[in-house]
Image (cartoon, grey):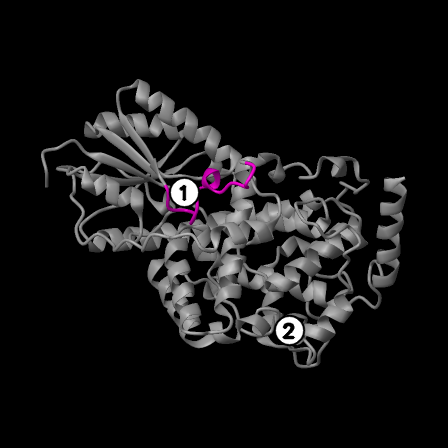
């Protein structure tokens, strides 16, 4: 224990000990370090699944901190008010945190930093959530990138610092401040019975994330180029939930991927490109924050999407559109908290093209239901699929769910895994869907599966293209 002033480490989406620049900077000040997580309005506004998953991560981190003689302090309230209170209680001289890049976080953090500095408190924000800070990647003309491929070319050869080791020891204050408990917060309340179904599919915490990365690089990355498109296969890293909450750092992932590429593993570079796609999403959310709420391309803001959540949208949410690939994907999400990336594109295309429904409705529903929800990736993914985002491919890219299923799930394994009504002896995963969804939906495996799609694939394509042609003219 040191007699130097304490440093408050404000944790957000950086719930790990290793490769944590803000944590190491706090320790380097030489005094006690007090890690704190604040349940503020931004946390309160999270959807049911990501809020529940956050609670699991906080519990894991609290245990890891206890193991090295530290603690995780939990406080609820306005972030600035909580930090000011802790500064006074501890006589703290500094507050540190890892940067976030979505518009709501930037607004909050800017306000907090200015106020604390006015109070005479040292304040530092650090990198750690991304490989490359968004303002450090510029085009030759000095602007930001609007297309992924040149963004990838610009960063692929950049040097990325090696990951930092976890601290072996963290100085504690003479007396720990009061902490609320996770039970007080009830972060999983809105999940209801779905939490029990979903829990076995979560890989929670830093140790689980690093173990999964090691397995993927050792066993699966070589076949990634093909396997990543097969929704019935365990062919991806599955680290999206861990990256979203900062249970693993992107630098650790980058260096693991680079080693695999140097070893000649064929899928490694493709996987690194996917890691950089996440960077591109944050590049865009930082430079064009309207991507979270308005069509990224200004001309698309008057496109005639419906914003009415009618019976067809409800059928889409319930996984009962009558289009098996779409329904299987939605059901996978309720049971596991995640959805295969190819399936996400098909689900989004069906909603925005065949049902002509605004991408914001799908974006909001994913925010409610995904345990790997990420503000930048979710916004970019929906706008990419809808045709309104930063993508050179035009609107008439309309996925046909039937041909996609034949190509990427030719034996129907994925469909059988998730749709009970289409088989005599349904799988346990398919049946668990009915245990995960809201009781108010009144769904049962004994209900007949829809005989016809709510909108047929050929019909929906024609309607979407007609709407596009009419809008253009």
- Can residue 130 be found in the magenta stretch? yes
Task: Say whether disc 1 or disc 2 marks the residue closer to the N-terminus.
Answer: 1
Secondary structure beneath dot 1 equals: helix
Q: Is residue 44 above or below residue 147?
A: above
What residue would you read off at disc 2? Answer: 414
Q: Is residue 290 above or below residue 281?
A: above
Image location of residue 114, percent across then percent down: 37, 22
Q: Quadrant of the C terminus?
A: top right
Outermost residue, front side: 140
Residue at 10% x, 41% y is 1
- Can residue 131 be found in the magenta stretch? yes
Q: Are marks 1 and 2 in contact (CB under 8 Å)?
A: no
What residue would you read off at disc 1? Answer: 185
Find the magenta span and give its range: 127-141
| Residue 396, picture quadrant | bottom right
Outermost residue, top side: 118
Image location of residue 261, percent across then percent down: 44, 69
Secondary structure beneath dot 2 equals: helix
């Amino acid at each position: 224990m040191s007699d130097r002033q304490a440093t408050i480490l404000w944790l957000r989406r950086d719930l790990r000990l290793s490769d944590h620049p803000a944590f190491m900077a706090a320790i380097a000040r030489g005094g006690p370090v007090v890690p704190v997580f604040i349940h503020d309005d931004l946390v309160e506004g999270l959807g049911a699944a990501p809020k529940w998953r956050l609670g699991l991560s906080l519990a894991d981190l609290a245990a890891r901190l206890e193991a090295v003689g530290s603690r995780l302090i939990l406080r609820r309230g306005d972030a600035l008010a909580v930090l000011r209170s802790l500064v006074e209680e501890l006589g703290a001289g500094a507050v540190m945190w890892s940067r976030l890049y979505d518009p709501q976080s930037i607004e909050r953090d800017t306000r907090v930093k200015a106020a604390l500095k006015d109070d005479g408190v040292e304040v530092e924000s650090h990198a750690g959530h991304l490989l490359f800070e968004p303002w450090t990647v510029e085009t030759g003309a000095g602007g930001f990138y609007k297309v992924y491929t040149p963004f990838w070319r610009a960063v692929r050869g950049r040097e990325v610092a090696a990951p930092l080791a976890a601290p072996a020891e963290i100085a504690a204050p003479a007396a720990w401040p009061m902490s609320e408990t996770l039970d007080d917060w009830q972060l999983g309340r809105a999940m209801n019975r779905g939490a029990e179904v979903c829990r076995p599919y979560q890989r929670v915490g830093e140790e689980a994330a690093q173990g999964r990365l090691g397995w993927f690089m050792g066993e699966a990355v070589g076949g990634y180029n093909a396997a990543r498109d097969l929704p019935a296969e365990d062919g991806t890293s599955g680290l999206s939930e861990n990256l979203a909450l900062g249970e693993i750092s992107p630098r650790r992932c980058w260096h693991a991927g680079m080693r695999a590429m140097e070893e000649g593993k064929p899928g490694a570079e493709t996987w690194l490109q996917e890691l950089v796609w996440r960077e591109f999403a944050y590049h865009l959310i930082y430079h064009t924050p309207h991507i979270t709420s308005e069509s990224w391309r200004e001309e698309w803001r008057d496109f005639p999407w419906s914003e009415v959540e009618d019976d067809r949208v409800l059928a889409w949410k319930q996984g009962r559109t009558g289009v098996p690939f779409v329904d299987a994907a939605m059901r996978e999400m309720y049971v596991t908290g995640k959805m295969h990336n190819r399936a996400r594109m098909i689900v989004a295309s069906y909603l925005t093209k065949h049902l002509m429904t605004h991408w914001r409705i799908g974006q909001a529903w994913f925010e409610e239901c995904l345990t790997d929800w990420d503000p930048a990736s979710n916004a970019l993914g929906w706008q990419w699929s809808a045709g309104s985002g930063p993508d050179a491919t035009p609107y008439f890219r309309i996925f046909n769910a039937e041909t996609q299923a034949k190509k990427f799930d030719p034996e129907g394994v994925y469909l059988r895994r998730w749709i009970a009504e289409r088989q005599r002896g349904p799988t346990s995963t398919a049946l668990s869907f009915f245990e995960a969804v809201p009781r108010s939906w009144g769904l049962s495996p004994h209900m007949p599966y829809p005989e016809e799609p709510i909108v047929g694939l050929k019909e929906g394509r024609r309607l979407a293209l007609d709407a596009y042609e009419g809008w253009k003219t």
